[in-house]
Image (cartoon, rainbow, N blue to C red):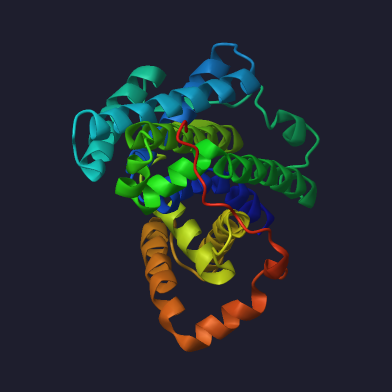
Amino acid sequence: MITAVELGLIYAIMALGVYLTFRILDFPDLTVDGSFTTGAAVASISIVNGINPFIATIFAFFIGSLAGVITGLLHTKGKIDGLLAGILTMIALYSINLRIMGKANTPLLGENTVLSFLRDRQLLGTWTSVALMFAGCMAAVLVIVWFLRTDVGLAMRATGDNEEMIRSFGVSTDNQKILGLAISNGLVAFSGAIIAQFQGFADIGMGIGVILIGLASVIVGQAIFGQKFIWIAALAVIFGSVIYRLVIQLALDAGLEVNDMKLISAVLVVLALILPQWKGFGKFAQRIRIRGKSVEPKETNEVSVDA
């Protein structure tokens, strides 16, 4: 179960990226399935070639961001439907990822990684590593919440809420979409890089279905904890990712096979979409939601024309 929590916290970074496109920009971005593997491939091949693992992981973030920029350009400048633009980039990334790794699988056994400090001291699989990973997730949440409250962040949120309205204020919605997709896929690639170092290899198929994991984390977390405020919604994504991994682990412990994971994910998303419509679930969720909403400072909706 501790390992499931660790995986949930690592995948939470990816889920935060999905949250930016799915909830903030209202953009169905399927680039995620490709950029997740891209992050893993870039980090793995860089580490194998002697690059510092921390630099390799940061490099993976920027390469993932580039994938998001490509999707954004296809959609905004190429006038291609957002869903199709993401699919096209995802398909292209499959071949690119193979080019990066040179083969379908790149092992990291014996290599120095960002998790070597914990692994060498046998701290992986303990609550110490969980605490450190949770701290990292909280840092990511703080940065995202801060960004979404800046003028640029408010413009991005307004782009997802009412594109025509915010365009009338002189804001370039195209630039906001490209920026949002870049940040989102950067976070996804970063998560992929950490996952590759956690499991000890990068595989060409490791990104298949990742978008479903991200959506499950966002939907499950926000169905339980709500999304009235940005900080609550972001935290809900973190806890939703952990809950998702715990449900998967419980299902496997109950006798289901690893091959059933995609089916479990699909069922979990369906339940997360249906259950909130049930009054009994609403009362249950209300009891466990974070207290103190009344003291949350009111967020301004003003957006700078220069954003």
In the foreground, 248 or 225: 225
Q: Quadrant of the N terminus?
A: bottom right
Give the image quarter of residue 83.
top left
- Number of marks drawn: 0
Q: Position of residue 228 (x, y in %)?
A: 55, 64
Q: Position of residue 201 (x, y in %)?
A: 51, 31
Work out whether residue 102 can be spotted: no
Residue drawn at the location 55% of the way across and 56% of the way down: 237
In the foreground, 91 or 220: 220
In the foreground, 32 or 100: 32
Give the image quarter of residue 57.
top right
As displayed, is residue 301 above or below residue 76?
below
Q: Residue furthest bottom?
A: 280
Q: Residue furthest top?
A: 50
Q: Position of residue 307 (x, y in %)?
A: 47, 33
Residue drawn at the location 60% of the way across and 37% of the way down: 198
Instruction: Indicate left or right for 174 with 15 as reference.
Output: left
In the foreground, 224 or 292: 292
As displayed, is residue 141 above or below residue 239?
above
Residue drawn at the location 57% of the way across and 18% of the way down: 47
Work out whether residue 136 can be spotted: yes
As displayed, is residue 102 above or below residue 186?
above
Give the image quarter of residue 56.
top right
Q: Position of residue 266 (x, y in %)?
A: 36, 63
